[in-house]
Image: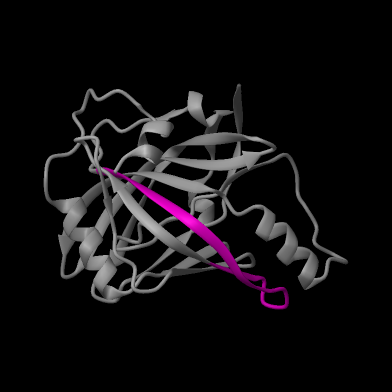
């Protein structure tokens, strides 16, 4: 089914180019209040919202003085619903364009810049993500909630697995010496990602070398991306 809606990006971009995004698109039809909810309540809700996988179509730009510019026009979130997996594939009206400082291995994104967007919701085995003109599809897995600071309006999480689906149909696993850490400020609507310089350089090198997807490439099935090795 198709759904035009506002997409809330719970965690976006990271690694290397600030590309290890935890893009968690979630539909919203109104304004929610957290009044009366304890830190434990919020932690439980956030933990249940952790996705099985997040995919980002990435178009790498220029590298200048250690700063890499990149664009993310599409993102997909895979979530378990009962005994089935569903996917939300988001197309941003304005592709997310950011610059990350590779030597520092950190990046910050303003979450509200991802709005508005269009989302297509379906079972994962019937879903695909556009890749035309991209360098890779970055896949994030093993999400874990690590903290909720209600008084600061911050939510912290980490990602334990990052792979890149390449134009030749293979996947390249990125070595993680430690989980990639992310902190989202609900008050400021900003996400800070701490990937570390080594991982950032590896991701930047991978994205800026080798052929990309052709300009006329067809969307790739999410099931193929998840199964690639």
| Residue nearest the observer in this picture, 92 or 78 | 78
Tally of numbered discs: 0
Which residue is depicted at the point 76% across and 49% down? 31
Q: Main secondary structure of the magenta part?
A: strand
**Relative vertical location of residue 29 with respect to residue 47 in this rendering, above or below:** above
Residue at x-position 42% and y-position 32%: 223
Q: Quadrant of residue 195?
A: bottom left
Q: Report the residue at 33% width, 52% height from top.
A: 163
Query: Quadrant of the image for the N terminus?
Result: top right
Residue closest to the far right: 36
Q: Report if residue 148 lies within the magenta region.
A: yes
Residue 192 x, y percent position in the rendering:
46, 69
199 or 70, nearer to the observer: 199
Task: Tell me residue 149's x, y (percent).
Answer: 68, 76
**Residue 188 part of the magenta segment:** no
Going by the image, does 124 lie left or right of 56? right
Classify residue 186 as left or right of residue 118. right
Residue segment shown in magenta: 136-157
Question: Residue 138 appears at what percent x and percent y?
Answer: 34, 48
Query: Please, which colouring scheme is shown?
Result: one colour
Taking depth in this image into account, of 33 and 122 the one nearest to the observer is 122
Q: Which quarter of the image is occupied by the C terminus? A: top left
Residue lying at the far left of the rendered structure: 210
Residue 47: image x %, image y %? 66, 59
């Amino acid at each position: 089914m198709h759904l035009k809606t506002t997409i809330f990006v719970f965690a976006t971009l990271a690694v290397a180019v600030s590309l290890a995004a935890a893009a968690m698109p979630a539909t919203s039809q109104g304004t929610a209040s957290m009044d009366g909810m304890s830190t434990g309540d919020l932690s439980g809700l956030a933990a249940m919202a952790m996705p099985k996988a997040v995919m980002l179509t990435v178009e790498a730009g220029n590298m200048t003085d250690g700063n890499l510019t990149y664009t993310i026009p599409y993102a997909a979130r895979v979530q378990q619903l009962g005994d089935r997996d569903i996917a939300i594939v988001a197309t941003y009206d304005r592709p997310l364009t950011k610059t990350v400082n590779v030597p520092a291995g950190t990046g910050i994104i303003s979450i509200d810049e991802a709005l508005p967007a269009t989302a297509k919701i379906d079972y994962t085995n019937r879903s695909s993500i556009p890749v035309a003109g991209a360098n890779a599809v970055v896949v994030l897995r093993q999400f874990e909630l690590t903290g909720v600071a209600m008084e600061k309006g911050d939510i912290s999480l980490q990602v334990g697995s990052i792979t890149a689906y390449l134009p030749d149909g293979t996947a390249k696993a990125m070595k993680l010496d430690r989980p990639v850490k992310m902190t989202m400020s609900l008050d400021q609507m900003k996400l800070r990602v701490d990937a570390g310089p080594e991982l950032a350089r590896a991701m930047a090198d991978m994205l800026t070398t080798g052929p990309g997807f052709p300009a006329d490439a067809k969307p790739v099935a999410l099931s193929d991306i998840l199964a690639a090795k």
